[in-house]
Structures are given as C-alpha cells and as structure tokens.
Amino acid sequence: MNAKSLSALLLAGLCCGPALGADAAKPLQPISALSVPRYMGTWYEIAKFPNDFQKKCVGDTSASYTLRDDGRVDVVNRCRTADGKTDAAEGVARQIGAANSPKLKVRFAPAFLSFIPMVWGDYWVIDLDEQYQLSAVSEPKREFLWILSRTPQVDPAAYDALLARLGSQGLDVSKLVRTPQTQAGQ
C-alpha cells in the first residue's frame, strides 16, 4: 500500500458495510453550511470506520487542509506506520455546489486523471461544532466515517454527544475504532 492509498483517508473517503437501523434508510444529512476558510488547518483523526486504504496506519493520523488561490483545497494526510515512519499522501478537494456547501469531492489520484469521475470521492461534513473544533465526515452510503478534532484528544462528553448525533443519522458507531494520538496538542 502506498502513500496515495492512505490519502483517500479523511476525505473520500472507509469500507465497513451497511449502516444499521431505521435511520439508515433516510438520506445522510450534511451540516447546513460550511465555511471552507475556517475549516482549513490541521485536524487529528480521533476515530474512524476501518478501511483498506489506512491499513498500515497505526496512529498519529492527521489531515492538513490549505486553501488554494483557485478555491480548491490542498490535502495532506499523514499517519504513523508500525515501523515508526510517517506515511503521507497528497490530494486535492473541491467544493460541490454553493460557496457554503458542506459537500466536497477529494482526489488522491494524479491530476491528469481528474477528468475521470470515479477518482473523486465524497467528503461530506455531517457534524461540526460552532467553533470548528470537532467534526465528523462521511459520505452518502455511510461506508466511511471519520471523527476529526483540532486537538489530538477530545473531551469525553463532547465525543459521546457526537456519537449520539451520528447514531441518529443511521451510522453504526459501534464500528468506530479510536486512533491512538501520541502528538502533543497544538
């Protein structure tokens, strides 16, 4: 597995099976609006649905987003592998729809493949606190889910409240796996 496959990470996507419960039959709802400039910066992965493209990541997973002049977003996903090295994958994201749309598409494939729709994965912000400190990202089929935070550790009460909201969206939060973070908060 190479760095590019890691990249599908906090963006397009996680391979986990169908969501459970009556709410899973309802379409997944993203947040009502996203300020992309406020979303920029580093986010630490707190938990995720297990997925193939992050198999070699054992901890310290993060995503850094930087707004480009053309309105797209540069994405750099990093994680620590079992041998203690850092694996990194670079991609690009673009907002879909209005300027405040919480729906993005992300690509980690080479730029010359950008014209192929299947190289772009859905990245929907489905939960975000008002301070832009704790976020949940998924996609319409609910196969992938990431919980992201501006800090490597999250207040347990805030995490539990987020899990309750995600469960009400039909996501099977029992599939979440916590991500070890040894990094100091920034």
Image (cartoon, rainbow, N blue to C red):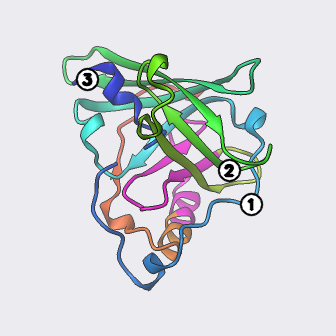
Image-based side of 43 in relation to 54, left or right? right
Q: Residue at 42% across / 61% down in the picture?
A: 142
Q: Position of residue 185 (x, y in %)?
A: 56, 29
Image-based side of 131 in relation to 14, left or right? right
- Determine if the magenta segment contains residue 136: yes
Q: Secondary structure at mark 3?
A: strand
- Tell me which label, 3 or 1, sits earlier in the chain: 1
Visible residue check, residue 152: no
Q: How far apart are the alpha carbons under marks 2 and 1? A: 7 Å
Q: How far apart are the alpha carbons under marks 3 and 2? A: 31 Å
Q: Position of residue 172 (x, y in %)?
A: 37, 69
Q: Is residue 106 above or below residue 139?
A: above
Q: Are marks 2 and 1 in contact (CB under 8 Å)?
A: yes
Q: Which mark is residue 102?
A: 2
Q: How far apart are the alpha carbons under marks 3 and 1? A: 36 Å
Q: Are marks 3 and 2 in contact (CB under 8 Å)?
A: no
Q: Amino acid at mark 1?
A: Ser
Q: Amino acid at mark 2?
A: Pro
Visible residue check, residue 8: yes
Look at the image and tell me in which quarter the C terminus lies: top right
Q: Which residue is mark 1?
A: 32
- Tell me which label, 3 or 2, sits earlier in the chain: 3
Magenta region, residue range = 134-162
Q: Please state which of the two labelled residues, at mark 3 or mark 1, is closer to the viewer.
A: 1
Q: Secondary structure at mark 2?
A: loop
Number of residues whose C-alpha sits closer than 10 Å to that of mark 1, classed few (under 14), some (14–19) or many (20 or more): few
Q: Secondary structure at mark 1?
A: loop
Q: Which residue is mark 3?
A: 81
